[in-house]
Amino acid sequence: MEKWYLMAIVVLLGLTVRWTVSLNSYSGAGKPPMFGDYEAQRHWQEITFNLPVKQWYFNSSDNNLQYWGLDYPPLTAYHSLLCAYVAKFINPDWIALHSSRGYESQAHKLFMRTTVLIADLLIYIPAVVLYCCCLKEISTKKKIAHALCILLYPGLILIDYGHFQYNSVSLGFALWGVLGVSYDWDLLGSLAFCLAINYKQMELYHSLPFFCFLLGKCFKKGLKGKGFVLLIKLACTVVASFILCWLPFFTEREQTQQVLRRLFPVDRGLFEDKVANIWCSFSIFLKIKDILPYHIQIIISFCFTFLSLLPACIKLTLQPSPKGFRFTLVSCALSFFLFSYQVHEKSILLVSLPVCLVLSEIPFMSTWFLLVSTFSMLPLLLKDELLMPSVVTTMAFFIACAISFSIFEKTSEEELQLKSFSISVRKYLPCFTFFPRIIQYLFLISVITMVLLTLTTITLEPPQKLPDLFSVLICFVSCLNFLFFLVYFNIIIMWDSKNGRNQKKIN
Amino acid sequence: MAALGIATGGRNWFSALALGVTLLKCLLIPTYHSTDFEVHRNWLAITHSLPVSQWYYEATSEWTLDYPPFFAWFEYALSHIAKYFDQEMLNVHNLNYSSSRTLLFQRFSVILTDELFVYAVHECCKCIDGKKAGKELTEKPKFILSVLLLWNFGLLIVDHIHFQYNGFLFGLMLLSIARLFQKRYTEGAFLFAVLLHFKHIYLYVAPAYGIYLLRSYCFTANKPDGSIRWNSFSFVRLISLGLIVFLVSALSLGPFLALNQLPQVLSRLFPFKRGLCHAYWAPNFWALYNALDKVLSVIGLELKLLDPNKIPKASMTSGLVQQFQHTVLPSVTPMATLICTLMAILPSVFCLWFKPQGPRGFLRCLILCALSSFLFGWHVHEKAILLAVLPMSLLSVGKAGDASIFLILTTTGHYSLFPLLFTAPELPIKILLMLLFTIYSISSLKTLFRKEKPLFNWMETFYLLGLGPLEVFCEFVFPFTSWKLKYPFIPLLLTSVYCAVGITYAWFKLYVSVLTDPPVRKTKKQ
C-alpha cells in the first residue's frame, strides 16, 4: 500500500483520542460502597488471582457474588487473571484479597487504562485496519477514511476508556470473525467468533448471522459433498474452542451449571436501568416488568426477538453473501437490543460494530445511526462525568464522517440502497418519489431533538416528581430512532439481492 | 453546530483541519499543567485587582509579571471574562488556586485565542507558493503546510498541556510574515511591533525585520544585479515605519514612563540574574559546552590532572542546578553570550542586505536569527525552539533542501521538549503526538519531493533514528537502573546534548545554504 503512512497516522490519531479520553473519570470513581464497572474489573482480578478456579463463580466467604461477582464467560476471567499477575508485579496491594476492595489511586488508574489500551491495540485496532485494507472496490483514500471513522467511533471509546470496560476485546474478536468468514477463512473466523462469545456472552447477538451465513455457505457447496465436510469441520472447530475455554469448568456438572447461571441471570428482570429498547420505552405506559412474572416476560421477549430477526436470517441462509452477512449482523443485533431479555444500554455497541463496517456502503445512514447510538448512552456518560469528552469525540467523529464520505451529498435513493425498494413501492403508489427528501428531514429532526435533549439534560434540573424524566426521554427518543433503523436495515436486506438478480437478468 | 455548516461544505479541508485540532485541544484539557498555569492565574489576579501602577511591583507570588505591558492588558481583558467563571481565581493571595472552573476558563482562553493562529495560518497558506506536485489534496503544499502549522506538536504540548499562550503570539508573528509576503509592509511592521510588546522573546528575530524593511521597503528599487540603488531611498517610508514603531511603543510603555516606572518594568523583563542555562539545559551550544566541560573534568580526575578538592561540588553531583560552575573551561558571562549571538546573527543579516532574495530570503534570515539566539543566548528556554520551527515550516514546502533542514530541526527540537512533560499519564500522549507529527511531516514532505534526491543522507537518517533508542533508554530503561538515584540528571543531559547536536547541525546547514545560494538576479517589481 503506497499510503501506509496515512494509515499509521489514522491509527495514531485513534490511539491519541483513546488515551486523552482515558484521562477522564471512570464509572463509580470515589463512590463507595459499590463503586462501578472499574471496581468490578479490579475485583475480578482480585478474585481470579487469589481463589482457585473452582471458586470463581461460586458464592463463598471470600467471594461475595453480590459485590460484583464474576458474571462473564471464562475468557474474561482468564484475562483478569493475566492482568492480575501484572498488577501483582507492580503493586500487590491492588489485588490483595478483601483489603483491596474499592482500591483507587492515580497509579492504579493508569495501570487499568493501560490494560485497556494494550488489549485494544492487540485485538481491535489490527482487525479494523485489516478490515479496511481488505475492502474491495474502493480507493486507498476511502479505505483510510473508513478506518479513521471506525477508530473514532465515540461510543466504544467512551465506554472502554471513560466508563471502563473491555468491549474492544470481544468486539475485536467478533471483527476478526467477520473478517475470516467474509474472506473464506471459515475455520479461523469461527474460532475468533467463539473466542468473542467466550469473552462476553452478549456476543450471542451476533451468533445467528454467523450461523446462518456459514450454514448458507455449506448449503451452497452442496450438503452431500464439500458442504458437509465444511459443516463437520466448522462444528468441530466450535466445539473444540468451547471445550478449550471451558476446560476447568467441565470437570463437574455443578460447575458448568453455576457458570451458566451466572452468565444468564434470569431473575434480574426484563431490562436494567434505562435502556433505549422497546420494553423500557413501553414501560412508560405500562410497567410490564412488575405486572408479568419472569417466565412470561422471557417468552414474550423471545417471541418478539425471534420474529423480528427471522426474515433476515432466512434470507441470509438462502443467499449467503459477505454484504448480506454484514447487514444481517446489523439487523439481528438491533433486534436483540430492542426486544430481547435483560439488555444493557452498553449493548448498543454490539449493533454499532457492524454498522461501522457498512459505513462506506451507506455513509449517511450509518453516521446517523452511530450518532444516535452514542446519544442513547448519554445518561450513563453523564453519570460518569464524561460530558466533555463525549461532546468532543462525537463532534470529531461527525466531522470525520462528513468530510471523508461527504455524507450530505449521498442521500439519493441509490446511495441509500433503497432503489429497488422504492421501485416496488412505486408499483402501487406511483407518486412516491420523495424518499430521500423524507430521510433528510428525518435526519434533521432527529439531530435537532438529540441536541436539544442534550442541552436540556445538562442545563435544567428535572422536576422533583420525575427525577428520571430526561433519561427516560433520551431512551424513548433513541428507541424510536432504533425502530426506524430496524425497519430500514430489514428493507435493505430483503430488497438487496432482488436488485442484484434483476441486474444479472438485465446483463 | 458550526460543525454542521462546515461539514456540509465537504471540500473545506482547512476548516476540518482547524476544527479537528481544536477538538483535540479540548480533549487535552484534563492533562497535567505546569506552574505556568499558576503564573498566568496570578497575572490575571494582579491585573484584575491592582491598579496599573502596581502591576510591575506586586510580588506576593514568586511568579511576578515579567511580560511586556500588552500582555498584561491582555490578561486584564481576560480577567473580565474570568470573573463570570470563578471570582476566586482573581484574588492575588489565592496562591496555587485551581478549581475546575478556573481550569476550564484558562484552558479555553488558550484554545479560543488560538483562533488568531488559525487565521494567520490561513493567510500564510494563501501567500506561500510551494512546489507544485500531484493533484491529490493530501499532496498539495498548502495542505501539508497547514497540517504542519496547525497540528504542530510543539505548540500543542507547550500551550495545551504545559500551558502557555504561544498560539496567538505565533499567530501575530505568522500574520506579520504573511503581510510582508503580500507586500503590505506597514501592516507587517505594525503587527510585529505589537507582538514585541506582547512577549519580548521575539526580539530575537527583530534584526531580520529591521534590515528587511529597511532594504526592501525604504529602498524602492534595486540595480539590475540585485545590489542596492542608494538614490531610491524613500524618507517618507522610513518615517512612517518609525512612527508605527514609536506609536506602538508609546501606547505600551508610555503609561509606565509617565508613572516613572520604566526601569522597574525593564528589570522585570530582562532578569539577567538567572543562570546561563535553564534548569533543564535547552539543547543549544552551551549544553554542548557544559557537557564538554563535564567530560573534561571527569577525564581530568581520572588522569589526576585536577585536584578533586578544588572542583565545585554542584557540578559533579547534579546537572540540575541553575548556576552551572565550569571546572575546566572558562565560565560564560552574559556579555560573552551576547557577543556570540551577535556574531552568529551578523552574517545572515549581511546576506539579507547584500543578497536580497525577496520575502523568502527574509524568512531564512529570520529563522537564522531565531536559531542563533537559541544556540548562543543567555538562559534560553527549550520552548524557544518553536520560534525557529514554525517559520521554518513555511520554507519546508518550497525546496527539498529546506525540507530536509526543517525535518532535522523540527524532529530534534520537538524531541527536546519531551522533558517538559514528565508525568506518567502524559507519557503516551507525548509519544503518540510526536509520532503523529513526525511520521506525517517526514512522509508528506518525502511524497512532495519524491522526484528529487532523498531528503536525508545516511548520517542524518541514523541520527534521527537514534532518537527512538534514546527515548526508550531515558524513559523506560533508566528509571529501573541503579543509576537513577546516583545520577538522576543523566536522561536530561543525554537528551539535551543529543538534540543540541541536531539543532546545531540544522543551523549550520541552513547557514551554508543561505550563504551559498545565488542571489535573485532579476530586479524586484515595486
Image (tube, coloured by chain):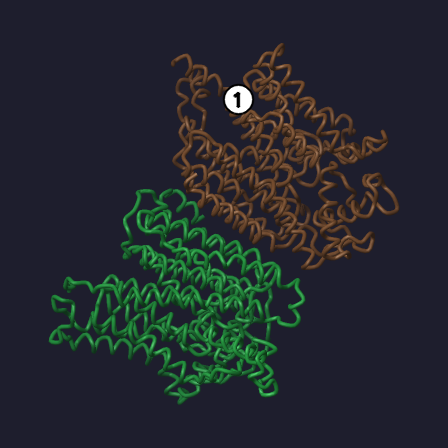
For label 1, the crowd category at 10 Å Cα-Cα, with few meaning under 14, some 14 to 19 and many 20 or more, is some
Residue ranking furthest to the top = A224
Name the subunit of mark 1.
Answer: A
Q: Where is residue A499 in the image (x, y as percent from the top left)?
A: 45, 18
Q: In which quarter of the image is the C terminus of chain A?
A: top left
Instruction: Check the image and report above or below for B75 versus A402.
Output: below
Residue ranking furthest to the right = A61
Rendered residue at 70%/49% (across/down): A38
* Chain A, hue in figure: brown
Q: Closer to the camera, A247 or A341?
A: A247
Q: Is B133 left or right of A385, judged from the image as shown?
A: left
Q: Closer to the camera, B133 or B492?
A: B492
- Type of amino acid at the residue the image marks with label 1: Ser
Q: In which quarter of the image is residue B297?
A: bottom right
Reading the image, the residue beneath label 1 is A321
Instruction: Check the image and report above or below for B37 versus B22.
Output: below
* Chain B, hue in figure: green
Q: Closer to the camera, A432 or A230?
A: A230
Q: Is B9 left or right of A221, judged from the image as shown?
A: left
Instruction: Check the image and report above or below for B387 versus A74.
Output: below
Q: What element carries label 1?
A: loop
Q: Where is residue A327 in the image (x, y as percent from the top left)?
A: 54, 27
Q: Is A34 left or right of B1, judged from the image as shown?
A: right
Q: Where is residue A314 in the image (x, y as percent from the top left)?
A: 59, 17
Instruction: Check the image and report above or below for B295 versus A131.
Output: below
Q: Where is residue B436 in the image (x, y as percent from the top left)?
A: 48, 52
